[in-house]
Image (cartoon, rainbow, N blue to C red):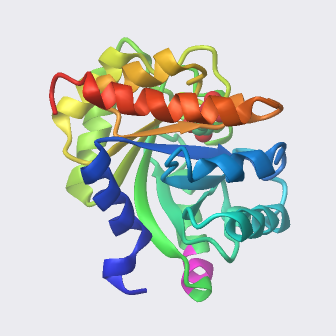
Amino acid sequence: MNVKNSTFNYLIEKLKQKGALYFILVDPDKPDHLDKLCDIAEEADVAAFLVGGSTVISQYSIHNVIQYIKKITKIPVIIFPSNVSSVAKGADAIFFMSLLNSRNPYYISRVQAVAAPTIKKLGLEPISLAYIIVGDGGAAGYIGEADPIPFDHPELAAMYALSAELIGFKLIYLEAGSGVKEPIPPYFISFVKKIVNLPIIVGGGLINSENIKNAVKAGADIIVTGNVMENDPNCRKKILEFANAVKEGVKERKIK
Ligand code: 1GP
């Protein structure tokens, strides 16, 4: 892969231009309304599709969803893996992620060792990502055997995020867990943002424009929504609204 043309470089360039980006997460086991999501994504300026989920059943379903998205749109597709079984061909990149606050070394470094040869063989672009689970943590926290960081201790997340930056990770993902009732509060995001220079992805429980705008205002660089689009026949309207909320959040940021 030519470094200049990498998905990571494309995202960083786009982030510089726009100030914040919007990603849509597709669970390959629940690809409802995927046609509608793909149709509207370019108009909404969605920066990437993430494909994955904590309980993904098969490599086959991931591969099918990647192929489907790529037939309809040119938006990059990034695998958001939960295990070795998520490594599939056809994506533009894969988050090569370590769950930093897991209690189990498997999710910190061992699964990465098992997956690395296949990632290399398939020619997937790895984007190193420090995954930090906070708040409820949802299924990701349970499966990943995490010690989720409570919302009243953002300094603990900042310590993990800073260590990730010093190690050389390229992105931070603050994850509240898919479908959780409470998304990451703005003060928590701001605290981490002040400490690290890496782009921060925020996801989990962001279900309306207000949540999204506030997260971006607080310093989130990339917003991810997944669950809220599933089973929603009005998902096209919602995508446009959410993409607009990301733009509004950038305009209202105090620290640019
Ligand atoms: C989950 O952060 C993502 O890994 C998205 O969460 O499904 O709650 O939008 P939602």
Position of residue 182 relative to residue 74, above or below, is above
Quadrant in which residue 129 is drawn: bottom left
**Residue toward you, 102 or 53:** 53
Q: Magenta span has 49?
A: no
Residue shown at 58% from the left, 78% from the top? 119
Is residue 52 visible in the rendered image? The answer is: no
Residue 220: x, y in percent?
35, 33
Quick check: 105 left or right of 170? right
Q: How many marks?
A: 0
Quarter holding ligand 1: top right
Q: Looking at the figure, which quarter contains the N terminus?
A: bottom left
Is residue 232 visible in the rendered image? The answer is: yes
Quick check: 29 left or right of 139? right
Segment tinted magenta in the rendering: 116-120
Residue shown at 52% from the left, 40% from the top? 103
Residue shown at 25% from the left, 46% from the top? 163
